[in-house]
């Protein structure tokens, strides 16, 4: 698959609320996933096991009320997507809306790297 086709499929599934299918269909087993600069605990994971642990942490800590997903912007083997999420942090009960840019790298027809950029919540 070409990068544009992968980007369009990922966005379509995310707009439908299916965040699991992209991992099954579009991701390399050697995926690298990075949050912001990757320096915080859990900020960089590798492989499906790391992605699964990250997803479990997210589900345990956040209730998602709504997600908006932009159309992708594609450049060679890269694409980006803007996500806006209305969530409640389960431990604190604090509800907020956040916005992030996700950047994906494609190699050999699979997503091999994803990195998310967003403002850290103020403490």
Image (tube, rainbow, N blue to C red):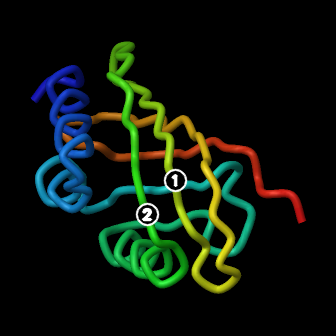
Task: Determine whether the residue tagged by mark 2 lies in a helix, strand or loop.
Answer: strand
Mark number displayed over residue 53: none
Which residue shows up at 34% across the image and 14% down it?
76
Mark number displayed over residue 86: 1
Which residue shows up at 35% across the image and 16% down it?
74
Q: Residue furthest right?
A: 123
Mark 2 vs 1, N-terminal side: 2
Viewer-side residue, 78 vs 91 = 91
- In the rendered image, residue 105, in percent from the top left (x then y), is placed at 39, 35
Q: Is residue 43 above or below residue 93?
A: above
The quarter of the picture where residue 9 lies is: top left
Viewer-side residue, 62 vs 44 = 62
Q: Is residue 99 above or below residue 95?
A: above
- In the rendered image, residue 37, in percent from the top left (x then y), is placed at 71, 50
- In the rendered image, residue 84, in percent from the top left (x then y), is placed at 50, 41
Viewer-side residue, 67 vs 24 = 67
Mark 1 residue crowding within 10 angstroms, few (<14) / some (14–19) / many (20+) = some
Mark number displayed over residue 64: 2
Which residue shows up at 73% across the image and 67% down it?
40
C-alpha distance separating marks 2 and 1 = 6 Å
Q: Is residue 54 left or right of residue 7?
A: right
Determine contact: label 2, label 1, CB under 8 Å.
Answer: yes
Q: Residue furthest top?
A: 75
The quadrant the N terminus occupies is top left
Which residue shows up at 23% across the image and 39% down it?
10
- In the rendered image, residue 13, in percent from the top left (x then y), is placed at 18, 44
Q: Is residue 77 left or right of residue 122?
A: left
Task: Determine whether the residue tagged by mark 1 lies in a helix, strand or loop.
Answer: strand
């Amino acid at each position: 698959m070409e990068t544009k086709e992968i980007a369009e499929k990922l966005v379509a599934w995310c707009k439908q609320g299916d965040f699991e299918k992209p991992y099954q269909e579009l991701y390399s087993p050697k995926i690298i996933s990075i949050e912001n600069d990757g320096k915080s605990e859990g900020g960089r994971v590798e492989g499906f096991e790391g992605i699964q642990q990250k997803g479990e942490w997210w589900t345990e800590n956040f209730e998602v009320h709504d997600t908006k997903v932009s159309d992708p912007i594609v450049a060679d083997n890269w694409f980006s997507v803007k996500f806006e999420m209305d969530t409640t942090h389960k431990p604190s009960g604090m509800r907020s809306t956040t916005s992030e840019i996700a950047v994906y790298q494609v190699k050999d027809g699979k997503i091999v790297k994803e990195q998310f950029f967003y403002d850290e919540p103020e403490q």
